[in-house]
Image (cartoon, rainbow, N blue to C red):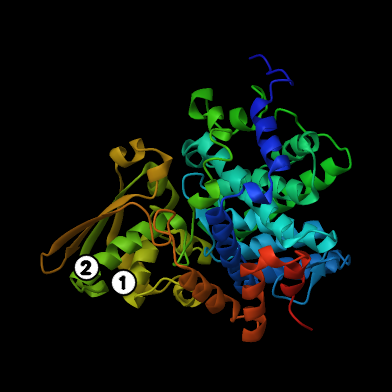
Amino acid sequence: MSTTALSDNRYTRGIARFVSELQYEAIPPEVLTRIKLLMLDSIGCAIYGADLEWTRILQKTLTGLDTTQACAVWGTPYKLSAPHAALVNGTQVQGFELDDVHRQGVLHVGAVVLPALVSIAETRRGMSGRDFLTAAVAGYEIGPRVGICMGPEHIAQGWHSGATLGVFSAAAGAARGLGLDVDRTVHALGIAGTQSAGLMAAQYGAMVKRMHAGRASQSGLYGALFAEQGFTGILNVLESEYGGFCTTFSRSQDRFQLDALTADLGQVWQTMGVALKFYSCVGSNHSTLDAIRAMQADHAFGAEDVEKILVHGSQVTMDHVGWKYEPQGLTSAQLNLPYCVATWLLDGDCFVDQFTEDKVADPDRMRIAEKVHVAHDPEITAKGSKFRHKVRVEVTLRDGTHMERTVEAGRGNEKNFASESDIVEKFEKLATHVLPRDHVEQIRDCVLGLDKLADGGALARLLAARG
């Protein structure tokens, strides 16, 4: 196979040009409104995530190694170097399966963009609130496009897309935050892309799954910082026929669509395609939970009334969340569909209080989970990545009642986005687990009014816990 000429980097360069040249005034008002709400949601997830076992391990380990004291670990009194802060903060955002997801691009966007960008705002004076929002939008636009280019095959073959795609979102946001020109942004993407990694086997109980987003954010930050100083990356990181991102992370060239990387860039805004979560579990489970919730509203039933539940979903749903549940830790519980259905049926909710170590091997949850079966529906898979969360759920009760409901996407999805009041309520509910209410309210007001701030670094300073 011949290698694509280095001059043939039209897609990487097209992305870099969009990122470098994006101006606040060119961003539609609805996108600016949406990015602030998305940011608020991610920050709430991160603050809640500050006091989880796996993030405490990272905090303790890195504060023992790194005495730089430059950037805050959100919701804590700790400070680290910018790259280490990005690693921990990204882990905190993704720490409890509560953060956003671009369903078609298969990416948790805020977890990779914001930690890198906030680190820059904290260490480089002069970034206005509008500059910050512009850089955030640049980051939110790029990673999902790489995911759309790759299609569902990428995650189906075992790559954790949040980690692999995330480096491009992080690098784009950081590059725009640093004000890099087109050439240096190309190099930032090329440096970030070669660091891309993340294995889906981490979903079966490993803490490291939580760290994937933080590592991607750190890699993107490195890409932008190194490129700023003249360090070079792979110029055609996305296009290269040998060793490029797309060819390496896909089984064959007909599995990805390079045109999707720049199609309608600046006209169709992928930021508007990011969905929010109102269950504390992987996004692939939300449509099933909503289907059951809707059926219960029509015909009340509980866990003991159920004879069998059959979920028809895409191949990604089948592989990603449809496996037989075995207690292996909180990560596997939050990713497993039968466990989450059992939790909803028993508790009437599937939020943070439902996922504790003592519940992972709860006999009642495991018994009810045995009643839940997941089957591949080729027709759903054939609809493509836009419909990867679509499910048709059949519920059979012990009295013979049979119900069926089809749901394309869960609450808070991009087609039926959550209200500002719902997002603020979720943010406050999460953040007040860790910080005092008055502090939480200051962060809320700062994010929602960021476009009016002369100093975008004010947000970074607010995210630190007071001594």
Residue 306's disc is 2
Reading the image, the residue beneath label 1 is 345
Q: What residue sits 36% from the left and 77% below the top?
A: 347
- Amino acid on which disc 1 is placed: Leu
Can residue 373 be seen? yes
Residue 372 is situated, as x and y percent measured from the top left of the image, at 29, 59
**Farthest front residue in view:** 25
Q: Is residue 378 above or below residue 295?
A: above
Residue 411 location, quadrant: bottom left
Q: Say whether marks 1 and 2 touch (CB < 8 Å).
A: yes
Residue 346 is situated, as x and y percent measured from the top left of the image, at 33, 75
Q: How far apart are marks 1 and 2 (CA)?
A: 9 Å
The one nearer the camera, 344 or 338, is 344
Residue 390 is situated, as x and y percent measured from the top left of the image, at 34, 49
Left or right, residue 126 beside residue 427:
right
Q: Is residue 302 above or below residue 255?
A: below
Left or right, residue 51 beside residue 177:
left
The one nearer the camera, 320 or 406, is 406
Quarter of the image for the N terminus: give it.
top right
- Amino acid on which disc 2 is placed: Val
Can residue 355 be seen? no
Quarter of the image for the C terminus: give it.
bottom right
